[in-house]
Amino acid sequence: MGQGAASTWVCGDGLSKERLQELAHRMGWRILSDLPALNYDGFSQVSGPGVVVLGWADPIRLTNALQLPVSACIEVGCEAFLDDEFGLLTLILTTATAYACDPGTAFTDAMISRGLINPLRRRDIRLALHEAMANGIEHGNLALPPCANLTPDAFIERASVVEARLASPSFGGRPIILSATAHAGAVEIAVKDCGAGFLPGQVIQAVAPDSAPVGGRLALSGRGISFMREHCDGFRHEDGGRRAVLSFRT
Amino acid sequence: MQLEINQTNRNMMIVLREQLIYSDTSKFSAVLQQVKGAAIDSCVVDLSGLDHIDSSGLRMLLLLHDACKECNAALTFSQARGQVRDMLLHSRFDTIVRIDN
């Protein structure tokens, strides 16, 4: 892989020295510090792309890791999903960790702190990323059906299914990948899941958020796609629906 | 999401803080269970501490509306501000739920 170049450095947080050494050896990376990444203060003295590997994450640890001057932040075990080329920033987490850590907000704030997107767009980007993450996690990696006809009882049952699937390695262990790349006058943020993609007849139809109620009821689903279109400067699906690409003018 | 539920007599107060997004499914499931099991006439949702909501969060509030209808309780969203208020009004929640300042 391209990431195996000797110029790539790595530091770890929340994983053992032995695990970090094994990972660095396997990927061809050089270890920057034996210290936990968050305690290392020599980042300004190194060049080349850096990767921080998280042994575990909570929202604060993830936010702090993404503030480090690295090109990628990955949960240990997800390294095989790193792309051959580093973009502006890549984040790879298992679905279970992503569900618990709100990576959408942390990624948005990391892009702002790097000066890659206008802070005035924070609200737009945070919402669009939440919508893309929700689709990628729920309909992609957790393989949950659409929500169009949910009742309160069905939602309660669905919550039990979500918990069970998050705890299952075959669902909760699937990676979800956020990656930002620079384009002429814009930054694109892609959210990629590892689910089955769009299935025939299961594509969620967009609903205009300001649609009038029908029979005293507002639509339960379909707003997410519309919000992504409203709050991004460009939006498209790729890879059979597994990859949502959000574009923001810079 | 940070959550607090209080009930006085037949009036329920639900306080939501921080954000209400797709990953709050389990916590909100507990809210719906509590509402469905309660003997109440009114349910007020204090949104003054909520600063962000996505379409999944809006769906949860619609399901709370359904749960309140099932038990004949009047639902009010109170003190929504900023992005949350904008999202509620943009999605026309004011046509089916009372929204107080």
Image (spheres, rainbow, N blue to C red):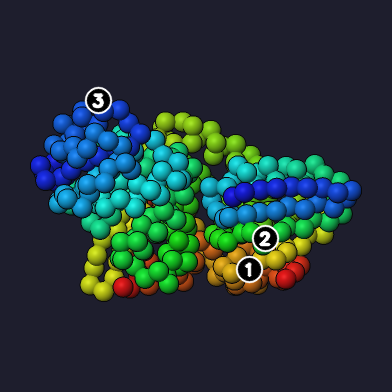
Q: Residues within 10 Å of mark 3 (few under 14, many from 20)?
A: few
Q: Position of residue B18 (x, y in %)?
A: 58, 55
Question: Which residue carries the number 1 mark?
Answer: B81
Q: Which mark is residue A18?
A: 3
Amino acid, disc 1: Arg
Disc 2 marks a residue whose amino acid type is Leu
Callout 1 crowding tier (Cα within 10 Å): few <14, some 14–19, many ≥20? some
Q: Label 2 vs label 1: CA separation?
A: 8 Å
Distance between the Cα atoms at labels 1 and 3? Answer: 49 Å
- Looking at the rendered structure, the secondary structure element under dot 2 is strand
Q: Are marks 2 and 1 on the same chain?
A: yes
Taking depth in this image into account, of A163 and B1 the one nearest to the observer is: B1
Residue situated in front as seen by the camera: A181 or A19:
A19
Residue under the point 43% across and 72% down:
A120
* Sooner in the amino-acid sequence: mark 2 or mark 1: 2
Drawn side of residue A56 relative to residue A48, left or right: right
Image quadrant assignment for residue A155: top right
**Protein chain holding label 3:** A
Label 3: element kind: helix
From the viewer's perspective, is residue A137 above or below residue A169?
below
Is residue A159 shown above or below B46?
Answer: above
The structure residue drawn at horizontal position 60% and vertical position 42%, both measured from the top left corner, is B26
Q: Residue B55 in the image: state x and y as whole percent.
A: 55, 59
Q: Which residue is mark 2?
A: B47
Type of the residue with mark 3: Glu
Q: Callout 2 environment at 10 Å: few (<14), some (14 to 19), or many (20+)?
A: many
Q: Is residue B95 above or below residue A178?
A: below
Q: Are marks 2 and 1 in contact (CB under 8 Å)?
A: yes
Nearer the viewer's eye, disc 2 or disc 3? 3
Across and down, in percent, residue A243 comes to 34, 54
Callouts 2 and 3 in the same chain: no
Check the residue under mark 1 and report the chain it is in.
B
